[in-house]
Image (cartoon, rainbow, N blue to C red):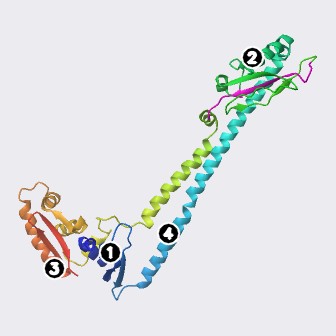
Amino acid sequence: MHLIYGNIHRLITFCLKHKANKLHAFWSILANRFNGESDVDILVKYNSDIDHNHYADKFTSNNSKIASLRYAMFVPLALMIAAVVASCHSYSSAKLAIAEDLNEAVLALTKENRELWTRQDTIAALRQMHETTHKPLIYQASDVNFRNSALRNEAYFSLALVDDKNEAPKIQGDKIASDSIMLVPELAVDGLAIQVQGFADCSMASVFAASDQTFPGVLFSLSLLSMASMFLWRRKEVGMPEVGVAPTGSAAHLLDGIKLTPMQRQFARMLIEAPGMRVDKAKLCTALWGGKSNAEESLYTLVRRTKAALASANIEIVCNRGDSYEMRLNN
């Protein structure tokens, strides 16, 4: 009930604006159990001269706008999903490009060093390393030409001796690997071969930085822009006025047909548009007369004459404890 009594003047203004004769509230709004999740249930009786078709059309129009808004929310969602899919595709393409770069480097390096790597002394060194460390020989790629120059610090090549009994040791970790090339020496026995393979120790961040995220970025920006547009449209088309703010046009509607001077009309509008229809004396004096020395006397005269002009419209101006003026609408 305190919500009703605390906003009684605002409710009266609302009824006058929309030509409502009676407004009945019922259920939880009248009980102590009313909270922020409760509904406000009201019955409205309009004036006899009201055009009910106008309000029916307005209700149908609002429902259509709400439905359109609901379906329009799929647009930013679809753009967001498209941005994620496009970003993942660009990321995968970047990984494939790195692997292809490694393949070209492995092929060029193998052609250049084939004779060196298939010599008997090299094979003996690889065999001894395998028996001692069980790890392949690592060849740094600092002097290899890559299309992506950043790979020089992140890529390396492995040389491992394999035969019918032994497989090449596996490189641990989640790395981007090239295809392997098998070099078979002359006079090889037991399927002896040298396996050459390239690796790139690239993190997800470095691969993402190397990928082309222009198109996904455009889609993501469009999704944010569409969400902002939906939010603004919702506030404009479906939103209600904020608490404490008088409905737009209420002042002009209440004062229609009342003969007032410009100063009296400005004073009345200040009261109507203020929260609770109450304004401090000091604020009124400053707004209406600035720094005039006898502003309070002028305000007293203005109030007395404005009260007389508004009396015929059942509008009353009350002085609260001598420090503010309040407008009250009598139904």
Amino acid under disc 4: Ile
> Which residue corresponds to mark 4?
66
* Pointer 2 with pointer 1, Cβ within 8 A: no
- Residue 189 located within the stretch drawn in magenta: yes
* Pointer 4 with pointer 3, Cβ within 8 A: no
> Which residue corresponds to mark 3?
311
Q: Tell me if 151 is positioned left or right of 218 in this view.
A: right
| Element on which disc 4 rests | helix
- The mark nearer the N terminus, 1 or 4, is 1
* Percent of width and height locating residue 252: 28, 72
> Which residue corresponds to mark 1?
29
- For this orientation, the residue located farthest to the right is 187
Tag nearer the camera, 3 or 1:
1
Tag nearer the camera, 4 or 3:
4
Above-or-below relation of 255 to 36: below
* Cα distance in 3D space between marks 2 and 3: 108 Å
Tag nearer the camera, 1 or 4:
1
* Cα distance in 3D space between marks 4 and 2: 74 Å
Q: Tell me if 34 is positioned left or right of 169 in this view.
A: left
- Residue 315 located within the stretch drawn in magenta: no
* Cα distance in 3D space between marks 1 and 4: 26 Å
